[in-house]
Image (cartoon, rainbow, N blue to C red):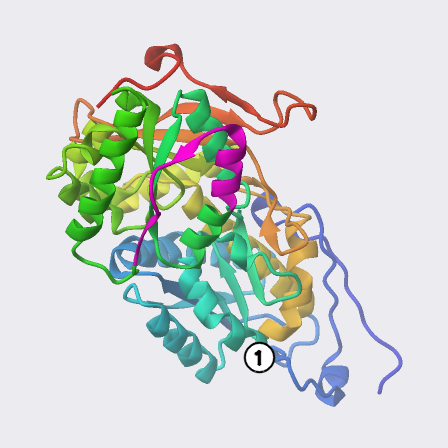
Amino acid sequence: MVENKTTLAFTLLIAGLILGGSVGYYSAQQRSQQKWQESIIIDTGDPSIPLKNAVVKLGYIAPDASTLAVGKPFHEQIIAADLNSYANILGYGTTFTYLIDDANGQDSIHLEKVQGLQSFGVTILEGGGWSSQAQSALSYCNANGMLMWSASSTSPTLAIANDNLFRMCASDGHLAPALVNIMWAFGVKSIVIFQRGDSWGDGVVNLLVPLWTAKGGAIEGNRTRYPVETADFSGYLKVADQQVATAVARNIGASEMVGVVMLAQDEVSVILKQSSAYSNIYNVHWWGGEGAAKNQKVMDEAPNEANHIGFYSLLPSPQFTLLYNSLQNRYEALTKQQFSSTQAYSYDISLVVSNSIYQTQSTSGAVLVPLQKPTSDRTFGSAGYCGLDEFGDRLGSSYDIWRYEPSATKESVSNQVGLYDPVAEGIKTGTGTVIFPEVIGPRPPGP
């Protein structure tokens, strides 16, 4: 091996947001002699700029067709365009391109798409949009040296140390106590649980139940757990409707003291549409997480039902940056849909991934995996600080409370109506503070 090396170190500031990162350049002679069994070294024959004119292929697997419809132009026309613009500023001429597909709402198809990327030599992807899809591909990614990032998988069951899945969103280990404290502050005393039957739904419920009962809250009946592929929810709604009726009776007819914990993803628009046939569950408030908050399918397909129910759902509070505001304007102009923290997380994933590619001069997932946490921990992205916990998940934060309401121009829009701060009351109580604007009062009005 050649002993004399030419090394050029510089600090890479992706979009002005990366706090630091040293990039080493190796001579052409050294690169040709090194035996990398697990990494793909980008060698253009230029020892001074190894990435010059290289094409870097990344994968993006949307969880379903509706997400693909907006995710594809977002990744192609905004994320990739920004990465390539920055590469040109560096003088590299590097081209980042996404191989894009969707999982058609199926865990098994998501795994097939991941395997397809690997067969093409692409081992870096953003996927696992649903936790069940991330779970389906995790073992394969671990075994085949693939790096998988998710912008929206939040199941606590996937908070696993030393695996190949990283999540730019916080685990719902934080969501369960937030829901408990927010519902309690709103005056809810009894809940009915209606949940998606996957690792995400199970993970949240398994954390929420003991917290809720410890606070003194009641749970009416058994949880309603439906398979992910369900299209007709009438049988499940009938059961939950009777549970709501019983819970309201136990609370002396006070429907505002009964809430439905609705843990669903895009299928929530169908559930809402069908719920109007069941008068009990249709006339109490529902509470949910990221899957239901600012959901475009809800606003398009079940606007009146969402407005009537008063569906309160939580999203982690982003740190609004100039870049976040710019992305929001560009995204909404491009897609005509509301921008949320999920899209900001996708953008920030690209910052971390591209920076680590520059640092290692490699497009191998196996090589990049160890660098994801230290790179994220030194990145301030569009949604704020990107630091990860020991499981490779975004550090927890406050939650914004969203509700569907009519507007002057649209049947339904999602508006922020409150904030949950998990540390505002101090370490002694640990219950957090729920802040509501005066317009909605101490508890939500009845449907």
Relative horizontal placement of residue 214, taking residue 234 as reference (left or right):
right
Place residue 217 in its image quadrant. top left
The quadrant of the rendering that contains the C terminus is top left
Residue nearest the observer in this picture, 117 or 192: 192
Task: Report the residue at 34% width, 38% height from top.
Answer: 220
Relative horizontal placement of residue 206, taking residue 296 as reference (left or right):
right
The quadrant of the rendering that contains the N terminus is bottom right
Residue 314 covered by magenta stretch = no
SS of the residue at dot 1? helix
Image coordinates of residue 230 in percent, x first then y, are 23, 59
Residue 194 vs 312, above or below: the answer is below
Task: Report the residue at 23% width, 30% height from top.
Answer: 309
Relative horizontal placement of residue 41, taking residue 224 as reference (left or right):
right
Residue 367 vs 429, above or below: the answer is below
Image coordinates of residue 205 in percent, x first then y, are 45, 47
Task: Residue under label 1, please give it.
Answer: 143
Place residue 359 in its image quadrant. bottom right
Residue nearest the observer in this picture, 63 or 218: 218
Task: Report the residue at 35% width, 47% height from top.
Answer: 222
Q: Is residue 49 visible?
A: no
Magenta region: 207-226
Residue 210 covered by magenta stretch = yes
Task: Give the farthest residue toward the right.
Answer: 3
Residue 429 vs 3, above or below: the answer is above
Q: Is residue 20 visible?
A: yes
Image coordinates of residue 124 in percent, x first then y, are 52, 69
Image coordinates of residue 138 in percent, x first then y, are 51, 70
Relative horizontal placement of residue 47, taking residue 139 as reference (left or right):
right
Q: Amino acid at mark 1?
A: Ala
Residue nearest the observer in this picture, 63 or 433: 433
Place residue 4 in its image quadrant. bottom right
